[in-house]
Amino acid sequence: MLGVFAIASVTAVGCAGGTARAPGAGSAADNQAEIVDVLRRYLNAYNAGDVRRMNDTACAAAQRGAAAPPLLPTVVHKIGVADIAGDSATVPVSLSIETRGLPSLPASVNIGVVKEDGMWRFCMMERPTAA
């Protein structure tokens, strides 16, 4: 993982709270929009240390009992297009950690999402690569 995975600037990329919608047999664009929405809501909740909201958007395997607010802010630069394969997807995300008000160089991570109970949910994050 990329050190502390804090998302202080998620609101800068338009992260607003919202109600999750169940992905159905909708279009690929609908699935993409729902996946981006669940990632933004999860990362915003993580940044706030809000375990309830994190668990609301996480798969069963990623549920938490507790979490602390992140120590270092992380700036999300871009959430890419999800590579969807059935009930799972991988989404490239470009982010950087901010230390003393200065962001590090952007890194690219692949965040996994899965469809559980008809809803797309955050499920894991792979190690970063240089962006």
Image (cartoon, grey):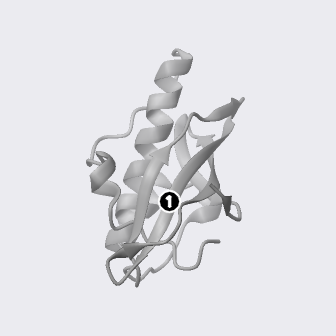
Can see residue 23?
no
Determine crowd level at label 1: few under 14, some 14-19, many 20+ residues with C-alpha closer than 10 A. Answer: many
Q: Nearer the viewer, residue 120 or 78?
A: 78
Of 108 and 45, nearer the camera is 108
Residue 35 in sight in this render: yes
Residue 106: image x %, image y %? Answer: 53, 61
Who's the residue at 57% across and 33% down the image?
A: 81
Q: Quadrant of the N terminus?
A: bottom right
When the figure is inspected, residue 29 is found, relative to residue 108, above or below; the finding is above
Snapshot quadrant of residue 128? bottom right
* Count of marks overlaid on the render: 1
Left or right for 60, reference 8: right
Question: In this view of the protein, which residue sits in the foreground, 29 or 55?
Answer: 29
Question: Compared with residue 15, is residue 61 higher up or lower down, i.e. above or below?
Answer: below
Residue 88 rendering spot, x and y as whole percentages: 68, 39
Lateral position of residue 19 relative to residue 4, left or right = left
Element marked by disc 1: strand
* Residue that label 1 marks: 95
Please name the amino acid that badge 1 sits on.
Answer: Leu
Quadrant containing the C terminus is bottom right
Identified at 58% across, 79% down, the residue is 3
Residue 38 horizontal/vertical position (percent): 44, 45
Q: Above or below — where is 85 with respect to 120?
A: above
Residue at 66% across / 39% down in the picture?
A: 89
Whether residue 94 is situated above or below residue 65 in the rendered picture: above
